[in-house]
Image (cartoon, rainbow, N blue to C red):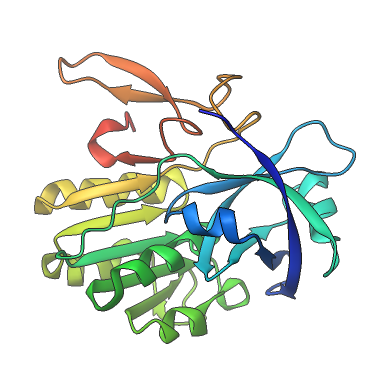
Amino acid sequence: MKYDAQDCLLVQKNKLTDTIYDFRLKNAGLAEISRPGQFAHLLVPGKTLRRPISICDVQDDIIRLVFEIRGQGTEILAATEVGQTINMICPLGNGFEIPEDKKIIFIGGGIGVPPMLYSARTAGKNAIVINGFRDKSAVILTEDFKKIGCRLIETTDNGSYGYHGFVTSPLEEVIDECDMICACGPAPMLRNIAKAAAEHGKECFVSLEQRMACGVGACLGCAVKINREDGSFTYKHVCKDGPVFRAEEVAW
């Protein structure tokens, strides 16, 4: 496969929290081929390695990226101004397959919430969304999820907003209403969701968060342990084979 780097024009920029930014980037060709659960690899001026950011949403010719400042690279990206371009390789990875005839629960945790927006939009009226945050100050994209018409449940760890508790608590209340689950967030959250899905006999797909360097499977730095049917295990790479995997594949 050929990976083309293209310049994308930043047409809108918003600051959602003290550390989370919302970018709208214009590139009709890339927008047309991007799918839920895939990611973009962004060039950072002055840095050798690109930064992977999940695709939050796609509408018309606009790709929306919502990311958190987690180091010098993302801090430099956050300083990009409207009217400037960002060089991206996009879309990368294997995303979520969203069947038209299934009721799906989408679960996001923290910065794993943004990619659930495009996924839930694709499912439309068949989507139930559960988003979990640390506290009220970390809550993002509430109005965006409401606008797509999904059933939305929001939780905070400390009860300062929405449902008090982790996402697995409301999940237990609605899990029997769904056919499958799609989730993105921290590994402990995904592990617990996978366990609940297995106990209820629900199909489950998880998008793994992993440090990436090349983004295309060349450097082998984002390896994750995967179960084999014979009880042994192997390794796959989050950037190329994922980031979405069947939950039972992952050796938690």
179, 18: nearer the viewer: 179
Q: Position of residue 17 (x, y in %)?
A: 70, 73
Residue at the front extreme of this rendering: 29
- Seen at 64% across and 37% down, the residue is 4
Left or right relative to 131: residue 179:
left
Query: Is residue 192 shown above or below 47?
Result: below
Q: Quadrant of residue 226?
A: top left
168, 63: nearer the viewer: 63
In what quadrant of the picture does the C terminus appear?
A: top left
Q: Position of residue 99 (x, y in %)?
A: 21, 59
Q: Position of residue 91 (x, y in %)?
A: 53, 46
- Seen at 48% across and 59% down, the residue is 115
Query: Is residue 27 shown above or below 197?
Result: below
Q: Position of residue 231 (x, y in %)?
A: 18, 16
| Residue 235 is at least partly visible in this image | yes
Q: Quadrant of residue 243?
A: top left
Query: Is residue 53 shown above or below 79?
Result: above
